[in-house]
């Protein structure tokens, strides 16, 4: 089994805070552990379907204050963040998969058969130019992480973050200081790229140079197209998404969902994979993830419940992600630290940008005097 071979490194942490008893055998073989995880999932499913047992109420109050008290209590060690485009909008990044943002309307100049084609793998392989033109316009390096990104970095520094599951491809989590191990980039990332034929890997610096050179990126080994490792329509999610999910969610002490309307599967379904007692905090401009009433009747719960008589663990904080994180940081006594971190890091990125721009201008001057190289396109 593939999940057996990839056990997350965070396994050695103690498990005693998980609300539901688990026969956890961390010293057993990986395969057995994966089996246990399946059992946890089935147990959760059955107990919620059959209404067995009453879940423990972990939060003393279904508010941001209640969540903050829980985080400070010392019982909340494994926080999972699930984030979407809403955490990057204050960085100036449009939600460019969403048809409502108007970005698709700007794509007319590329003569696409239909707007979504720009992210479709088959179309891309034949006509990569529109995608790279868009990538130039929206290039990740031109943006700075938001307060929300740095809040997650603080969670990591303070030892609370088990993992961040992101739907974003802008790499801002990495810019803010989360590392590969901390992150599941469910829809891929610009951080690495691969040749579509020979699979040679290329890094972000190389891809950036290609994107700004006006040429379509080509492999220096076999001349085939090189594609950033983002998940196009028609491609599978990264294997690590599925393997990590099975290990992480049954052990989650607090789920923080930010900046996503929880409409894209399989990502949206993750909220139902934490234990029944695990509190879930949504910070978003609108409520999201609530159970479908029909499915609720059938007992296949797992959806968010913020306000019914039975609500016991879900908290909705309706605000921008930055405001929500600042409010939570204040309640945790971390506000000053957070604003300092943002100021320091933004200053660092600005000065780095300046250096690169002057370097780039110098390079352009010298290349302008040389004869342009022949383009290798069909
Ligand atoms: Zn190649």
Image (cartoon, helix red, strand yellow):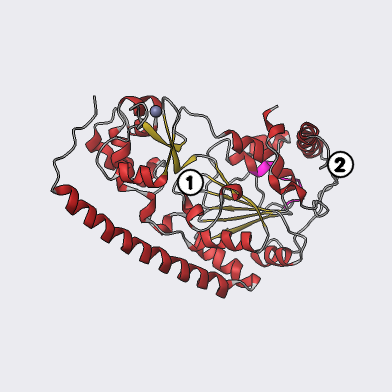
Query: Which image quarter holds the C terminus?
Result: top left
**Ligand 1 falls in which quarter?**
top left
Residue drawn at 52 percent across, 47 percent down: 261
Judging by the rendered image, the residue that carries numbered circle 2 is 23
Q: Position of residue 75 (x, y in %)?
A: 77, 60
Q: Is residue 76 above or below residue 65?
A: above
Question: In the image, is the residue at mark 1 within 8 Å of ligand 1 by its beta carbon?
Answer: no
Q: In screen coordinates, is 40 left or right of 254?
A: right
Asked if residue 337 lies in the magenta stretch, the reply is: no
Numbered mark located on residue 168 in the image: 1
**CA distance for labels 1 and 2:** 35 Å
Stretch in magenta: 271-278
Residue 30 position, x and y percent, is 76, 35
Give the secondary structure at mark 1: loop
Q: Is residue 309 visible?
A: yes
Which one is nearer the viewer's eye here, 222 or 306? 222
Residue at (83% x, 41% y) in the render: 27
Residue 159 location, x and y as percent?
68, 60
Please report contact status of discs 1 and 2: CB closer than 8 Å, yes or no: no
Q: Residue at x 49, y 60 (%)?
A: 320
Q: Nearer the viewer, residue 249 or 54?
A: 249
Mark found first going from the N terminus, 1 or 2: 2
Binning the other alpha carbons within 10 Å of mark 1 as few (below 14), some (14 to 19) or many (20 upward) gives many
Q: Answer with left or right where residue 56 lies relative to residue 333.
A: right
Local SS, label 2: loop
Q: Quadrant of residue 1?
A: top right
Note whether 346 is above or below 311 in the view shown.
below
The quarter of the picture where residue 356 lies is bottom left
């Amino acid at each position: 089994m593939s999940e057996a071979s990839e056990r997350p490194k965070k396994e050695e942490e103690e498990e005693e805070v998980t609300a539901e008893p688990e026969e956890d055998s961390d010293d057993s073989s990986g395969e057995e552990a994966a089996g246990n995880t399946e059992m946890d999932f089935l147990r959760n499913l059955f107990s919620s379907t059959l209404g067995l047992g009453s879940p423990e109420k972990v939060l003393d109050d279904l508010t941001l204050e209640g969540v903050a008290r829980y985080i400070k209590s010392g019982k909340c060690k494994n926080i999972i963040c699930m984030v979407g485009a809403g955490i990057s909008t204050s960085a100036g990044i449009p939600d460019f998969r969403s048809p409502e943002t108007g970005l698709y309307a700007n794509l007319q100049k590329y003569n696409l058969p239909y707007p979504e084609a720009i992210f479709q793998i088959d179309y891309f392989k034949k006509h990569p130019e529109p995608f790279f033109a868009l990538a130039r316009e929206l290039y990740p390096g031109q943006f700075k992480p938001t307060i929300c990104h740095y809040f997650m970095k603080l969670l990591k520094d303070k030892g609370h973050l088990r993992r961040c599951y992101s739907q974003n491809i802008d790499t801002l989590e990495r810019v803010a200081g989360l590392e590969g191990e901390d992150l599941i980039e469910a829809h891929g990332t610009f951080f690495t790229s691969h040749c579509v034929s020979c699979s040679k890997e290329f890094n972000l610096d190389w891809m950036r140079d290609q994107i700004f050179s006006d040429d379509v990126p080509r492999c220096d080994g076999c001349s085939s197209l090189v594609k950033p490792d983002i998940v196009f329509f028609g491609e599978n999610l990264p294997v690590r998404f599925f393997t990590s999910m099975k290990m992480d969610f049954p052990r989650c002490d607090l789920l923080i969902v930010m900046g996503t309307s929880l409409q894209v599967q399989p990502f949206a379904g993750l909220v139902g994979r934490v234990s029944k007692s695990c509190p879930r905090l949504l910070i978003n401009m609108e409520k999201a993830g609530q159970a479908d009433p029909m499915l609720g009747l059938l007992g296949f719960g797992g959806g968010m419940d913020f306000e019914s008589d039975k609500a016991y663990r879900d908290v909705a904080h309706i605000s921008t992600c930055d405001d929500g994180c600042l409010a939570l940081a204040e309640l945790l006594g971390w506000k000053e630290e957070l604003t300092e971190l943002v100021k320091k890091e933004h200053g660092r990125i600005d000065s780095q940008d300046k250096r690169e721009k002057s370097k780039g201008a110098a390079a352009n001057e010298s290349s302008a005097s040389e004869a342009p190289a022949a383009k290798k396109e069909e």
